Amino acid sequence: MTELNLDAQTRTLVKQVEKALGYQLEFKIHEGKVGYLRHDQAQHYLRGGKMVLELSDLTAPSYTVAHELLHILLLTKKIPEITFNLTTTKPALDTKLMAVGLELYEIVMHFTVYRMQAEMGLFTEKIQELYLKGLFATLKPEPANGNDNWMILRTLGILDTLVFFKRDQDRVLPKLKQLYPKTTAAAVALYSDLTAHEVESAFGIRRAVVKLYHSLDEDLTAWGLAPLNLKQFVTLTLVLSARQTRLQVRQLFEIYHSALHENIHDTTAYLGFYKKDGQNSFVLPQPKSHPEQEFQRIYALTLGTYLDEIGVPYLTR
């Protein structure tokens, strides 16, 4: 069995996460070293009621394990989460939308994760070199003329790089602009929008994710590519004030019928859009009878009462 050698701080973090979860983590380790860093070199998932951390590369195990552990630790906190309650009925398209929606969400989480890794001393010169090597190994340069199907992946990869090098962006921007001029410009604008406000509170995380979903579609449209409409496809946890929970649903939400299907009941879906940001915040199946009367009833309820009725979690601030 492959032995996992971790530094002292990462071993301490393992214990911290296990305490938060209330049980021991299970590790699944694969041999091999590609010689660069990518965040898909580790993943976590539930199996048999326990959290499994699977490590597919041992280039920098302490960094990679700590990164994944911090994502797990954040899930134990009160932060907005994303869920995928809808299907386009086209599996390949669903997979693409889920991948991009999750990656943008995790980029926002990286403001916290990277800060905590830096505090652990895991942002050494060697780690930074391995991160950049992984980026350039993953993303081929932009075509000299026109756009291609890599525009989204480049934008996401470069945006994450700007978060990673937040205190030293001048070190990496010249090379990024040389290889990826259009997507670097888009990523820089996205980063500027994100950092105009704080991004680590529950409210800040939600605002940042919604902003990314909206702004990426604007970039795709400008490049002549189809928008993803992630504000419709992805459900994002609400962050409400106590006062808002006492307001009627009609005051804060608009519920629209969608061509997308709701996953559980396999009916066309009704989506609850939060008026303040236009984000999908809950998904309803097709009512079994008298939909007009049912929605009149829903709109008259207080928001807190209704969210509790349908079992949709929310955060308060």
Image (tube, rainbow, N blue to C red):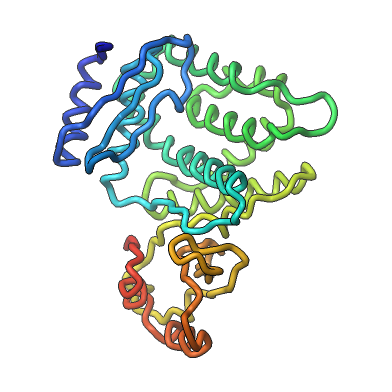
Q: Viewer-proximal residue, 109 or 147?
A: 147
Task: Give the quarter of the image for residue 282.
Answer: bottom left
Picture quadrant of residue 24 = top left
Of residues 47 and 214, which is closer to you in this image?
47
Query: In the rendered view, does 271 fall on the left or right side of 248?
Result: right
Q: Is residue 212 visible?
A: no
Whether residue 310 is situated above or below residue 148 in the rendered picture = below
For residue 238, above or below residue 57: below
Q: Residue at x 82, y 24 (%)?
A: 144
- The quarter in which the C terminus is drawn is bottom left
Residue 135 visible to an observer of this rendering: yes
Residue at (18% x, 34% y) in the render: 18
The spot of residue 1 in percent (x, y) is 25, 12
Q: How many marks?
A: 0
Residue 84: horizontal and vertical position, in percent? 47, 53
- Which residue occupies the extreme right position in the image? 145
Q: Nearer the viewer, residue 175 or 36?
A: 36
Residue 211, above or below 1: below
Q: Residue at x 21, y 27 (%)?
A: 14
Spot occupied by residue 248 in the image (x, y as percentages of width and height): 41, 82
Q: Is residue 13 left or right of residue 303?
A: left
177 vs 85, left or right, is: right
Q: Nearer the viewer, residue 46 or 300?
A: 46
Residue 119 % position (x, y): 31, 25
Indicate left or right for 123 with 197 as reference. Answer: left
Q: Residue at the spot x=77%, y=46% of the render?
A: 222
